[in-house]
Image (cartoon, rainbow, N blue to C red):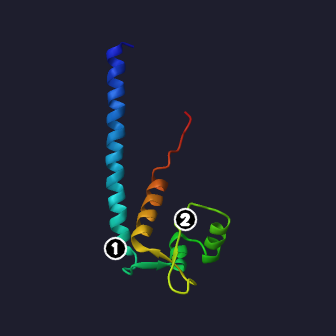
């Protein structure tokens, strides 16, 4: 392989990574727009509603948080502090990142 060919290969890989980051931002924007439309328009989402959105029980979510799982967003507590609330904008951002991460999982296949 000549050095010139190697140089072109490096450039083409760089362009591919650049396009994938542009495609990533576009996908994130589409996911955020869909979530903005689909989620309730209140400023806060309850912990019960959040658990049902991600497909687990509220008690399971509480147990995972107590066990130290840092994957889920941390809720805030207002007033008497009995009901955990999630700011809508932060929840939309977290859900969009999680959905994009699930879509972008790389599956390695041996030939």
Residue 3's place in the image compared with 111, above or below, is above
Taking the view exactly as shown, the residue that stands out farthest to the front is 79
- Element type where label 2 sits in the image: loop
Considering depth in this image, is 42 or 12 the residue closer to the camera?
A: 42
Residue 70: image location, x then y, percent: 58, 61
Mark 1 and mark 2 in contact? Answer it, CB < 8 Å.
no
Taking the view exactly as shown, the residue that stands out farthest to the top is 2
- Which of the labelled discs sits on residue 72, or is there none? 2
**Residue at 56% of width from left, 83% of height from top?**
81
**Residue at 35% of width from left, 25% of height from top?**
9
- Which of the labelled discs sits on residue 20, or is there none? none
- Element type where label 1 sits in the image: helix
Q: Quadrant of residue 108?
A: top right
Total numbered labels: 2
Spatial CA span between label 1 and label 2: 22 Å
Q: Is residue 74 left or right of residue 87?
A: right
Q: Which is nearer the N-term, disc 1 or disc 2? A: 1
Residue 18: image location, x then y, percent: 33, 40
Residue 69: image location, x then y, percent: 62, 62
Q: Quadrant of the N terminus?
A: top left
Q: Quadrant of the C terminus?
A: top right
Considering depth in this image, is 73 or 40 the residue closer to the camera?
A: 73
**Residue at 36% of width from left, 12% of height from top?**
2
Q: Quadrant of residue 33?
A: bottom left
Residue 104's place in the image compared with 33, above or below, is above
Q: Is residue 40 left or right of residue 53?
A: left
* Circle 2 Cα neighbour tier, 10 Å, few/some/many (<14 / 14–19 / ≥20): some
Residue occupied by mark 1: 37
């Amino acid at each position: 392989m000549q050095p010139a060919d190697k140089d072109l290969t490096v450039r083409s890989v760089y362009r591919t990574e650049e396009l994938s980051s542009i495609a990533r931002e576009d996908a994130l924007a589409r996911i955020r727009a869909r979530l903005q439309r689909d989620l309730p328009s209140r400023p806060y989402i309850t912990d019960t509603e959040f658990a049902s959105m991600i497909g687990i029980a509220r008690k399971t979510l509480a147990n995972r948080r107590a066990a130290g799982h840092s994957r889920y967003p941390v809720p805030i507590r207002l007033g008497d502090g009995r009901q955990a609330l999630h700011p809508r904008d932060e929840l939309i951002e977290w859900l969009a990142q999680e959905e994009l991460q699930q879509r972008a999982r790389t599956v390695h296949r041996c030939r």
